[in-house]
Every structure is written in C-alpha cells, then in structure tokens.
Image (cartoon, coloured by chain):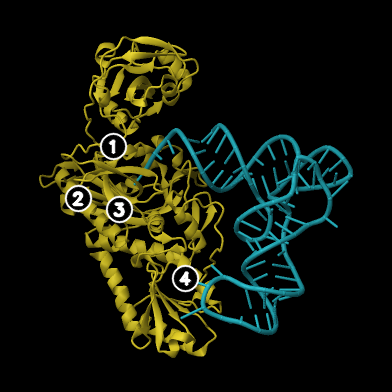
Amino acid sequence: MHYSRLLIPTLKEDPAEAEVVSHRLLMRAAMIRQVARGIYDFLPLGRRTLRKVENIVREELNRAGCQEVLLPVVCPSELWQESGRWDIYGKELLRIKDRNDREFCLGPTHEEVMTDLVRRDVRSYRDLPLNLYQIQTKFRDEIRPRFGLMRGREFLMKDGYSYHTDYEDCLREYASMREVYGHIFRRCGLDFRAVEADTGNIGGSLSHEFQVLAESGEDLIVSCNRCEYAANVEKAEMRTVAEPARADAPVTEIATPGVRTIEEVSAFLSRPATEFVKTLLLVADERGVAVLLRGDDQLSETKLKALLGATDLRMAEAAEIETLTGAPQGFAGPVGLALPLYADERLRGCADMVSGANRADTHVTGVSQVRDFPGVVFANLRTAHAGDECARCEGGVFEEHRGIEVGHVFYLGKKYSEKLRATYLDAAGAECVMEMGTYGIGVSRTMAAAVEQNHDDKGIIWPVSIAPFEVMLVPVKWDDAASREAALRLEADLEAAGIEVLLDDRDERAGVKFNDADLLGIPFRVTIGPRGLAAGKVELKARAATAAEEIALDGAAARIAEVVRNAHQELRS
RNA sequence: CGGGGCGUGGCGCAGUCUGGUAGCGCACCUGCUUUGGGAGCAGGGUGUCGGAGGUUCAAAUCCUCUCGCCCCGACCA
C-alpha cells in the first residue's frame, strides 16, 4: 500500500483535548477522530488495527468452539422488560422510539437478545452446550466518557454468551474462556493480569477481569507477590494483622469547633489517622447504616454491598447525616449511635481511639471498641492496598497496579435464562432452565490499552500482531530513480511473501518521513537511500529498537519476512 | 447532576479585562533553492470569532439565553 493513497492526516501538534497517551497518539497518528463526546471515527490505519484485534479474538474463539453471530444494535424494549433491566439499567441505556412510538434501546450488552435467540431455537439437551458471540458496536450513554477510546460511549466489543445443561459444564466453559482470553491478550502483546472481580449489576457469582497494566488505568488492582491471587482492590481479600493493643483510656470529650475531616482533627489533636475511628453513614436500600473504619482506611462499597446483600447503596447526604446522628457532617462516632454498626476487622479490640461525639463541634478520645461499642458486626470492609498480606497464601504481600479492563468473564447462572425462560428438555423429557456464562472483550479499548503500554516520546510502537502494517518502507529520496525502483521491488517481494507493507512514496524530506514513521509505530522500518544502495544495502530498524541494522538489498525481502515472522512467533509463545 | 475551564481559518493558539478595519505559528496552493531526522525565500487562498437575542454610532470583546467540548467529583461496564 502506498502512503500517498491512504488517508493519513497526521497531526504535528497534540490535540488540546487529549489527556492520556493513547488518545493523544491515536489522534496524532491519524487513527481516530472524535465526532462527538465519546464517539469516534476510525480512519484507515485505525480500522486496520481494530480489524487485527478483532481477528485475533475471532480466531482464538473459533478455535475454542465458539460460533460467531451478529445481533441487532437496535433492540426492542420488550426483551428488556422481560429481564427487568428496562427499569433498572438507568440513563446509560440510550432509549429511542420508532415512528410507531415503539420503544427500543441501543444495545449496551446483549444478554437478552442472545438468550431470546437461544430460547426460540434450542430445545434439546443435545443442542447444548452452545457458545455464541458477536463483535459489534455497543452504545452506553456513559455519564462521563473520557480518555479517547478508553471510555467511549460507542465502542467495539466482543460479547459472548454460553448456554449449558448444568453448573459443572458452565464452569468448564468459564475456565476455558479464561484460558482463551489469556491467549488473546498475549497475542495482542499486552502485559495483563486476570483478577477476581466484583460481579456488579450484571449479577452472577464468579467473575474475572482482564486488566492491562498501565499508569493511566481507571481501575486499581492488587496482585500477590507469592501466589497467583490478583483482585480488584474493591474485592481483594487480605489478612488483618493484629496490632499491639494500646491501653484503655477514659472517654473524654474535646471541643473541636469546625474541625471535621480526619486530616483536620488529626492535625488539631496531633494524633495519627491510625488512632481514629472513621464513621461513615450510608443508606442501603433506604435504610441508614454506619460503617466504622480505621482513620487511614477507605471503605470498599463493593464489600459492604456484598455483606449487606443490598441492591442499592449510597453515601448519606448531609441532611440525612444530621437526622441519623443528631450532629452535622464531620462529627459522627460509634459511641451511643443508634444505628446498625458495621466495622472493619481492623477495629476489633482497638482502644484509646478518637472519634466524633455525635454532637456539633465535638470529638471524643479514649474510645475502646469492647467497652464503648461492643455491638458491631465485623467484616473485611476496607479497600486493599500495596503491602497488605494476601489472604490466599502464607506470607504473600500485595503489589498495587493500575489497570485497564479489557476483558471480563462472568458465570451468570440462571439469572437471565430463568427470566426469559430459556429452557431445554433433558434426557428424561423434563424442562430445565439453562445455565449461562457471559464473556466480553473491549476491542477498541484493547487497541487503546496497547498504545498505553507500547509507546515512546516519538509515537506508538505497535506489537506486530495488531499493527496496521507490519513493515514500513521509507525511501528517503522518492525522486531518486534507483531508490524508487529498489523500494517498489522490495514492496512487491514482501507482499509476495505475505507481509503487509506501507511504502512511504511521498516526496517529503527524510525528517518528515522518519517522524511520521515513528509516530505511526509500524514495528519494522526499512530505510532505502542512495547512500546505502551504492553499497547494495538498506537499513532495517525495529520501531522498538534504538539501533538499525544494515542488510544486503539482495535477499532483503526474505530476511525481513523472517524477522516479521519471528516477531509474530514470539507473541504466540 | 454539581464544580471549574474552553469554543477565533484544517490544527495549535493570541486578541476579550479596557468595544473601534480579525491576527500569529503550523498546515495548504504556486515558484525557485534545498533534500538521511519535522528546510529557506517569495507570493497566495482560507474565518457566519459555536449559535440566538440584547446593549451600543460600533461587539470576537459587554449582558442574557443556548449548544458543544475538556477537566474534577458523584456515577458506572
């Protein structure tokens, strides 16, 4: 392919709105353009990379026995009414009406539609198991789209759903998908972790997220340095290490006018945050509860929600706090608080702590758990951090990473199949509800994650498996007949060898070509110039490498093709 | 939804406070010179100043409304 024939309007300057590396570089390298908030065009190069990711996904899934289908973008509300999600999904679900005033939504996920397909056409246990997937544009009207392709409203997603006769078979498929996802992301050249995750609103009880490690990631995860355990910090199970108990002290009230936050009170009293009981007021399914944490810990709402079995959980508003505690925000404490109390394990048996007094402008010191607030339910409620001890092994310690969630696998059970009556007849002729699993991959997000992980200050460094082209030919003097001839021949030879080649046939200065080549990030660059040709040589440089290698023009195509194949091979091992 | 910011040529921005002929850099077009890491000179085209309304002799600039985009928060596959 010749550069001048492709639409590649690279940008010399950073677009003002791009915050993160992938957004900036994908824009500058002319792979994407924003059309509206969270909605993007894919230009030719971007389309090619997206297609590469798609094809890796497709190949690996097909190999694992999954079948590709294509479901509609516009989905009738009836199915969503049936599952009950029409009313609970909220504003993220973009709802539209047709000319007859019938309600539809743009599919943000397709459990309903896929299950509808299956329930209509699958009758017998003989037809199961079944794993169907599609690669299709999704729309979620996110409150706050950001970071380019990382959190768009419209995005390309692979979503798959599996149907089984029983739990064991569903778990087998779940494990298989987990493994396949590993192959997929390895082939995409990504450094990632499969982490245990919360199942959120989708429901179900078993879930792994595939997190690409990157500073710009929106998720925080911990992984054990000793065993395989890795989890979202919201979910991670860690040990509570016993602290040396401090001596009891009498409860003493202290005037703290206008001093509210842990930081403020800590500074005011000159005592560390570790000696504070932080009291948070929340509303769980319309019911007020108080959660106690050590001053320096953060609540994991995920863990609390799981503990309470609540479907709706939110922080109390200022007015509600006054009603619940009798004091303005910033002065709540466990002593004498007439609410259900849930405390993080770390507070078990603590003594001589500081907390709010449930009275305006007043705190108390000398609070002891056993003596002053014995009636609490203890649980692991705090967010995990680096340095916490792993609960799954002996002696392991957590490391902390930021991650970009590019894939998830969920065991769903019968949540949707029951509501939508997806049933089959077993060998005995009895009607049974199917077991389900659901498996997603953010295809466009994976593309962004790859850039987050593979770039330098000059541009993108695509892993060869998802690069828009494998080799870029850069004749530094396009108007030099010998250079041109050598470049065209090399292009033909490489293409004959099945290599995807981008030939920069622009009549530009060398500097411009090199800079664009670095920006586009095509993994191998071959520089062709009069200087080298005089000696029968061209220059081969890996985008990721600093040094170039001189190779003989004679046999160059074979040599380059080999290097490219090796690079592919490395991602498969 | 709350807080903050920004909309001026394709891109990046100045000009707005203090109203008075709409600018700069890059890109683009033409010519000459140049040519292995974003060339030089000369010439050229490019704008409903996001939109609507208002104030004024006069509005990019002041006022009101509105739309879009970005950031922070709440929220969330």
Residue identifier under label 4: A517
Q: Residue at the location (54% across, 57% down)?
A: A14
Give me the disc on residue A413: none
Q: CA distance from mark 3 to mark 4?
A: 27 Å
Quarter residue B11 falls in: bottom right
Residue identifier under label 1: A235
Residue A490, position as x, y percentages in the image: 40, 84
Q: Residues within 10 Å of mark 2 (few under 14, many from 20)?
A: some
Q: Are marks 3 and 4 in contact (CB under 8 Å)?
A: no
Residue identifier under label 3: A192
Q: Residue at the location (26% across, 69% down)?
A: A569
Q: Earlier in the sequence, mark 3 or mark 2?
A: 2
The amino acid type of the residue labelled 3 equals Phe
Residue identifier under label 2: A175
The amino acid type of the residue labelled 1 equals Lys
Q: Which one of the lettered chains is coloured cyan?
A: B
Q: Earlier in the sequence, mark 3 or mark 4?
A: 3
Q: Residue at the location (48% across, 41% down)?
A: A143
The reply to the same-chain question for discs 1 and 4 is yes
Which chain is mark 3 on? A
Q: Residues within 10 Å of mark 3 (few under 14, many from 20)?
A: some
Mark 4 or 2, closer to the camera: 4
Is A500 left, or right, of A192 in this rendering? right
**What's the colour of chain A in the image?**
yellow
Vertical placement of residue A54 versus A316, above or below: below
Q: Residue at the location (52% across, 83% down)?
A: A478
Q: CA distance from mark 1 to mark 4?
A: 43 Å
